[in-house]
Amino acid sequence: MSIMTSAFADAAELMALVQGVPDHRFAVIEHPIASADTGGLRERAEVAAAVFAEVVLVG
């Protein structure tokens, strides 16, 4: 599983397809992260953690 911001999600999906792993899972978080404050980063981390838990626990 990977974490990708929304601005790069399409490119990441294409790279996964080209590299032979079209079902690679991504947690897509809000872009950008560089200018996000602590609360914004926490929200993005919670989104990523929820997707990770789904991938690990559900499959």
Image (tube, rainbow, N blue to C red):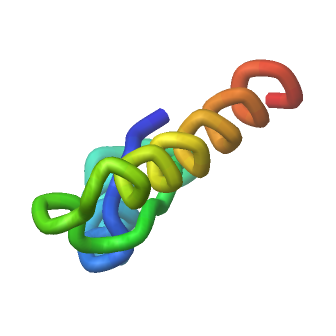
Q: Is 6 placed above or below 5 here? A: below
**Who's the residue at 69% across and 40% down the image?**
50
Judging depth in this view, the residue of 30 and 18 nearest the camera is 30
Q: Quadrant of residue 8?
A: bottom left
How many numbered marks does the figure carry?
Answer: 0
Q: Quadrant of residue 15?
A: bottom left
User: Residue 45 at what x, y percent from top left?
Assistant: 47, 42
Left or right: residue 54 versus residue 18 is right
Left or right: residue 19 versus residue 3 is left
Left or right: residue 42 versus residue 31 is right
Name, please, the residue furthest toward the left: 34
Left or right: residue 16 versus residue 45 is left
Q: Is 9 placed above or below 3 here? A: below
User: Residue 16 at what x, y percent from top left?
Assistant: 35, 52
User: Residue 5 at what x, y percent from top left?
Assistant: 32, 64
Name, please, the residue furthest toward the top: 57
Judging depth in this view, the residue of 36 and 21 nearest the camera is 36
Q: Quadrant of residue 29?
A: bottom left
**Who's the residue at 52% across and 53% down the image?**
43
Judging depth in this view, the residue of 48 and 55 nearest the camera is 48
User: Residue 18 at what x, y percent from top left?
Assistant: 28, 58
**Who's the residue at 48% across and 34% down the image?**
1
**Who's the residue at 27% across and 78% down the image?**
7
| Quarter occupied by the C terminus | top right
